[in-house]
Each structure stands twice: as C-alpha cells, then as structure tokens.
Image (tube, grey):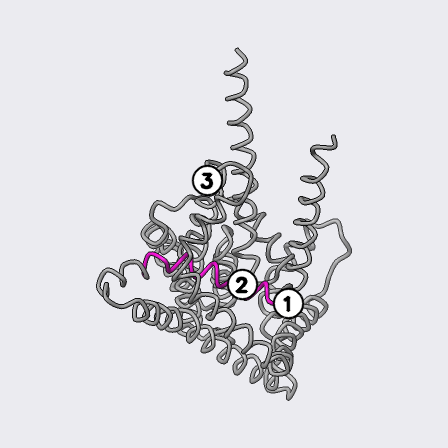
C-alpha cells in the first residue's frame, strides 16, 4: 500500500491539474472543438497540397486555410445574413398587417377539420381556433429568429475572438496534428491498440458527419428553398433552411416538402403540388443516396436510429455544435463497449 501511495497522489494531482486546465479554457472549448473537427476533415486536403509544394511549409497551410474559409466561413456568413434579412422583413410585414399567417392555414384546415372532428372523440374544434393557433405559432417562430439578430450583434466581439482562435489553433493542428496524436497515444495509459481505435473512430465519424451530413443537408435545403420559391410558397428561404436542419437527421426534409405538396393539392393548386411532389421524391430525396456515399467514402457509419437519437441529444445539449458532437459521443460509446467485449473474449480464451 505504501509503495502505491506516491503514484496515487501523483495521479490525483494530475487529474486536478487537468480539470483546472479545462475549467480555465472552458469559454474557448467550442473554438478548440471546431478547430479539431476542421483539422480532421481537411487534413487529407492539406496532405495533397503538400505533395505539390514540397519545398514550402507555410504555403500549403495558407492554401488549406483559404479553402476552409471559402467552403465554410463565407457561405455560413452569407446564409446567416440572408436568414436575418428575410426573417426580419417577414416579421415586420406580419406586425404591420401586410401578411396574416392565419389566412394561409384557414383553407387547408377547413378541408381537413370535418374529417378530424368526425373520427375524433375530442370536443369539436373550429377552423378559427386552429388557424389562429397555427398563425400565432408561425409568427412567434419568425419573431424568435428575428430577435436573435440583436443578440448576435451584441456578441460580435466574442464571435470574432472565437473565429480567430479557431483558425489560430487550426493552423497548428494541421501542421503538427499527426505528431500530437502519436504523443497522446504514448502518454495515455490505456493501451496503444485501444487508443488508435478510438482516434480512428473519432476521425471517421467526424468526417462522415461533416462531409456526408452537412454538405448533403445544404444541397437538399438549397434545392428545397428554390423549389418553394418557384411554386410561390411564402418565406421560401426560411423553409429551405428548416429543410437543411432536418436533413441533418435521418428523418430528412420530407417532413417539410411532403406536407407542402398536400396543402397545395387541398387548396386546388394541383400543378404546383405535383411539381413539389416530383422534385421532392426524384431529386431532393435521391440526393442523399447519390451524394452521401461519394462524400463519406469508406468512413464509418452508424445505424439511422442511433444517428437520430444522438443528433437530437447533441442538439439539446450543445446547440448547433451537437449535430457533430452527438454522433461522435455515440460512436465512441459503441467503440468502447466493443473494445471491452473484445478484451473480455481475449481474457476468456487465455483462461481456457
């Protein structure tokens, strides 16, 4: 016992110092996380660029950083500004009475409500009750989006610091990432084989989520938003962004365009309903089947139900970052239990 006491004390001290360090940088953990994710996703690109510029160390790094800015930062800022502009404009029109959301729901509800009241054991509902509630819910949702703009402006300095820190850390992770991983594997006292498996799993899920999830979601949402604009559905860009978010989940954007086609059909806009249905089935839904395998490649996948639950849980815990962090935690959870099962089986074989 006395021989183990110094080691236990030292281990306790290491854990306390590690905890203190993470508490020290807790306000910047989000920047560190996104720097790691971007480094994992773009490391193959960086390695390819290095092959063409073997005599320069800085140029491949700068070119990779510029590519990341073009692929992620500029589109993200553009989309944010467009959402802000459209939601603010739409909310002002609702407040001024130029647009009444209740009217858009009345015709459809008037067609569906008699059937619902006939088969439902609940007290009969009126068209005005439901359409007013639906209109208020829609107006409140638009109001919420519009009110995020002042908060975003107030936190602009913090946002700039987070962006700058992310790219600063990313620079060193791209340059020294492989050395850091080797050092971590040698330092963590778990076992090199297990650590390599965990790092490989983290890398594969991060790439699959960002490449196969985010890019496919943006393509589906963009196509859906353009489709809604073409058939004259109000707030087409906001609906497109909602389809983008839902496309990150296995449920998909069908939850938006399918009801839209039904509503258009019930309102008598048969041609527009057929257009939405055809484009939704044969183009938007098929994007996932054709584009995701090419983007994800051999990266590991999880079953749809696990992706759905982990993504929803991640979004609830970590906000937008959760759509990446949730599946990563789930994948590491499965990998840890798989590895523990393998170790257990190996121990049994040794005994027998």
Per the image, the residue denoted by label 2 is 32
Q: Residue visible at 69% across and 49% down? A: 13
**Distance Cα–Cα, label 3 vs label 2:** 22 Å
Which label's residue is closer to the chain start, 3 or 2?
Answer: 2
Q: Is residue 272 magenta?
A: no
Residue annotated with mark 1: 27
Using the image, determine if residue 172 lies above or below residue 203: below
Give the side of residue 92 with respect to residue 225, left or right.
right
Secondary element at image label 3: helix
By secondary structure, the bulk of the magenta-drawn segment is best described as helix
Instruction: Give the answer, above or below, for where 3 lies relative to 142.
Output: above
- x, y (%) of residue 109? 62, 64
Question: Callout 3: few (<14), some (14-19), or many (20+) C-alpha neighbours within 10 Å?
Answer: some
Q: At which x and y percent is residue 227?
A: 40, 69
* Residue in front for this viewpoint, 23 or 82: 23
- Is 63 left, or right, of 2 in this rendering? left
Any part of residue 305 in sight = no
Q: Are marks 1 and 2 in contact (CB under 8 Å)?
A: no
Distance (Cα) linking label 1 and label 2: 10 Å
Q: Along the line of sight, which residue is nearer the eye, 34 or 104?
A: 34
Region rendered in magenta: 27-45
């Amino acid at each position: 016992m006395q021989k183990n006491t110094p080691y236990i004390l030292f281990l306790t001290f290491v854990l306390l110092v590690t905890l203190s360090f993470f508490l020290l940088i807790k306000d910047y953990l989000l920047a560190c996380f996104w720097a790691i994710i971007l480094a994992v996703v773009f490391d193959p690109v960086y390695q390819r660029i290095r092959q063409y510029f073997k005599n320069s160390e800085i140029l491949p790094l700068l070119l990779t950083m510029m590519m990341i800015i073009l692929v992620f930062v500029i589109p993200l800022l553009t989309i944010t500004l467009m959402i802000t502009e459209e939601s603010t404009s739409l909310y002002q029109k609702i407040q001024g009475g130029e647009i009444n959301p209740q009217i858009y729901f009345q015709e459809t509800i008037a067609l569906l409500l008699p059937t619902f009241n006939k088969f439902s054991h609940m007290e009969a509902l009126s068209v005005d009750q439901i359409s007013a509630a639906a209109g208020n819910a829609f107006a409140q949702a638009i109001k919420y989006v519009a009110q995020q703009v002042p908060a975003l402006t107030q936190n602009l300095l913090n946002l700039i610091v987070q962006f700058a820190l992310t790219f600063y850390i990313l620079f060193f992770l791209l340059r020294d990432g492989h050395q850091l991983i080797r050092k971590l594997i040698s330092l963590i006292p778990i076992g090199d084989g297990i650590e390599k498996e965990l790092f490989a799993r983290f890398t594969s899920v991060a790439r699959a989520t960002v490449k196969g999830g985010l890019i496919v979601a943006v393509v589906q949402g963009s196509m859906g938003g353009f489709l809604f604009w073409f058939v004259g559905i109000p707030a087409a860009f906001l609906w497109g962004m909602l389809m983008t978010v839902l496309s990150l989940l296995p449920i998909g954007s069908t939850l938006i365009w399918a009801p839209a086609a039904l509503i258009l059909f019930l309102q008598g806009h048969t041609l527009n309903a057929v257009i939405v249905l055809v484009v939704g089935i044969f183009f938007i839904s098929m994007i996932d089947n054709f584009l995701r395998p090419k983007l994800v490649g051999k990266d590991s996948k999880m079953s749809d139900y696990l992706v759905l639950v982990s993504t929803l849980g991640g979004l609830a815990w970590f906000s937008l970052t959760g759509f990446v962090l949730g599946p990563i935690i789930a994948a590491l959870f499965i990998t840890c239990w798989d590895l523990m099962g393998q170790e257990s089986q190996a121990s049994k074989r040794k005994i027998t």
